[in-house]
Image: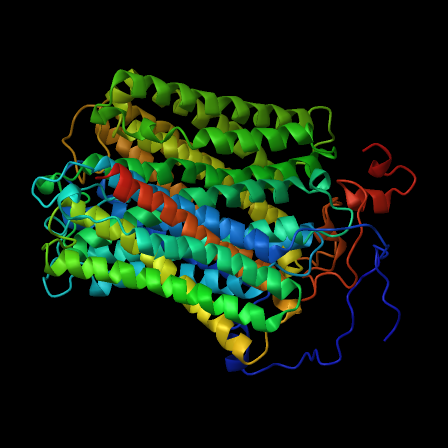
Amino acid sequence: MSSDAMAIPSAGTAARPWVEVVHEWVTTVDHKRLGILYIVYALAFLVVGGIEATIIRIQLIRPHNDFVSPQVFNRMFTMHGTTMIFFVAMPVLFGFANYLVPLMIGARDMAFPRLNAFSFWLTAFGGILLYFSFLGGSGLYGAGNAPDVGWWAYAPLAAKAFSPGHSSDYWTIALLVSGFGSVGTAINLIATILCMRCPGMTLNRMPLLAWLNLVMSGMVLIVITPLTAAQIMLLVDRYLGGHFFDTQAGGSATIWMHFFWIFGHPEVYVLIIPCFAFMSEIIPVFSRKPIFGYPVMVGATVCIAFVSLSVWAHHMFTIGMNSYANSFFTITTMVVGVPTGIKIFNWLGTMWGGRIQFKTPMLFSIGFLFQFLIAGLTGIMLASAPFDWQLSLSYFVVAHFHYVIVGGILFALFAAFYYWYPKITGRMLSETLGKFHFWLFLIGFHVTFDVMHIPGLLGMPRRIYTYEPRPGWETLNLIVTIGAFIQGIAILIFVTNLVLSYFKGAKAGNDPWDAWTLEWSVSSPPPPYNFASIPVVASRRPLWDLKHPEDPDSRYE
Amino acid sequence: MSAVTTPFPERSLEWNLPYRGKVGMVGLIVAESAIFTIFVVAYLFYLGKSLSGPTPREVLETPIFFTVCLLSSSLTIHLACKELQRGHRISFRILWSITIVLGALFLFGTAREWHRLIYERGLTISTNLFGTTYYSLVGLHATHVTAGLIMLGIVLLFSLADRVGMEQSARIETLSMYWHFVDAVWVVVFTVVYLIGR
């Protein structure tokens, strides 16, 4: 395929002073560079959050361990949760969306490039604020540093009386600021997808990745903002002496839970829908078949988005709601499983009868399918209120949602990294290291999180810093911690692969996977202007049409 | 430079997409609506739950005049946009200024009411639940009015420098969408605070 890079007269190859390079990155408004910034930023926080998880697991490796103090343990699980959701998962997914959406819809940039940069830097400062709490959190009170109220900061624990100093303020403001960033990026993605498509790219021909990111961005608008509102209320309580969550003055602690989980549960779908998007691009390419049931996939995604807005209180079965509320939230939660199941069948239908190539991205995708299914099944178990009364706040719940976030989201992200790294850097990731990474991570994941269900069933509560040497608990916790270390080694292999392949990896060329969407039509890495001339498309698989003029898709659509 | 070869020839095609400014503003309005919804829910949930006085019935007075000001500013900004589309810069400037004056009057009304509540009735944000929810909800709206006034003021400055013409019509209309939203929110806040809440 011919290259469509234009020769730019000023593009020199001589080494430039580093100040200039840094300045260029800091002031960039290019969607590809901002995408990379998002991804690198998230990877840095992934390592930080991973270290915090490791500290938690070392502390729990045996009963009566004193690796860290109870106070530090509280800080670790709070920071681990907050970091992983707000400063790893959100930015990395926004990063991929930023990088890929304009390329896939044939646009030269996002709709609002400067808003894009602004949103990234808001998110970045949010993360820095959160971690600055290690230095500034104690304030003048000597009240301990980082936030230690859990990632959902239930009232009244987060009130001034029970959380003195500034640690909770850093948590609040970090989430507030990064929330504004998320809303900005979501608005940008929506405007880009609706207003910047290249000629011929009707909504019906958009790659599923663009479709799913459109749905995800729509959700962000109405899901992140309740958290923003709740954080403003918490700040009013903490700084202005308000009584929103002050039970002494007639306020309600429960309403914080409602506000938090109105954000908190749909947030899971905000995170998983872009992962569905990765799957919907990667599985067809490595099955050598177009996606099965394109319109149904879009419909199921919109369904998930709608239903997921009415399931939040399944996190609150144990607070004592009336039986109507319990039944309602049980039913809606189970209903979410239907469109999700449709999606899984569609991916299987895509693989069925295909010539499957077991490259690393495909391996991670298959891992995703299997683990996401199991995560969904334990989710259905927990959706049942009586079952949840028994197991809420136990390690069973922790195992369930890590199955979603690690087994689902993280596996999909790894697939996306192996799939799009060649496009972003121009070099292939090593397949050998990739396979080591996959198998080690798969084993580590299952050792940790399969086993973690059992202490939960045996009654081990989450967020305890140590436990009694009861029969069963010690061995199980030891196994879980060993699994965490295996995952840690796999992550190190992944990071090594990212760094080594950047310098030594095989040249990728424009289209290493023989794929069908527009981003593979330009050079790797793409030129700053993306497309020398704006493409015109006639089907869902423009590159297929180009490669097979004798039998184009456009003939059948 | 050699001829650029590209896999996708540029073809002429009937291809119309929505204006990105409007789509972006609709997105912002949806997001803001969610924030206001949460505050309105909190206000309604806490109605009558204060453990001590004063209550809304005792201290609130319905600000009818200032409400009329704000709502009629929606009409003037709409007319201003229409004038700009026709290229009438002077009448645009006049109607735009009236909009700002009406918005500022509303803000003055809020300030006066707060002054009265704080100094005469002793109701502050920390007095009771009513104070907390009232000042947060009305204050959140007033913040949006202030932000809107700042943006309207910037446009007025540009207009005085004669830099706002028909070409900016789409952008001005995008801004007017925000102002309409702020007005619409006041209808909800007014209903909740002064009609239902008393």
Question: For residue B22, what is the image quadrant?
Answer: bottom right
- Residue nearer the viewer, B120 or B143: B120
| Left or right of A441 in this view: A168 | left
- Residue nearer the viewer, B147 or B197: B197
Q: Position of residue A65 (x, y in %)?
A: 16, 42
Residue sitting at 57 percent across and 28 percent down? A300
**Which residue is outermost to the front?**
B65
Residue sitting at 57 percent across and 44 percent down? A213
Of the 4 image quadrants, the one containing the N terminus of chain A is bottom right
Is residue A457 something one can see in this rendering? Answer: yes
A509 w.r.t. A7: above or below: above
Question: For residue A167, what is the image quadrant?
Answer: bottom left
Q: Position of residue A378 (x, y in %)?
A: 40, 23
The color scheme shown is rainbow
| Left or right of B152 in this view: A507 | right
- Residue nearer the viewer, A162 or A450: A162
Q: Count the marks: how many?
A: 0
Q: Position of residue B156 (x, y in %)?
A: 49, 73
| Left or right of A75 in this view: A52 | right
Residue sitting at 36 percent across and 43 percent down? B188
**Which residue is outermost to the right?**
A550
| Left or right of B93 in this view: A139 | left
Of the 4 image quadrants, the one containing the C terminus of chain A is top right
Q: Position of residue A404 (x, y in %)?
A: 43, 34
Question: For residue A346, what is the image quadrant?
Answer: top right
Is residue A440 something one can see in this rendering? Answer: no
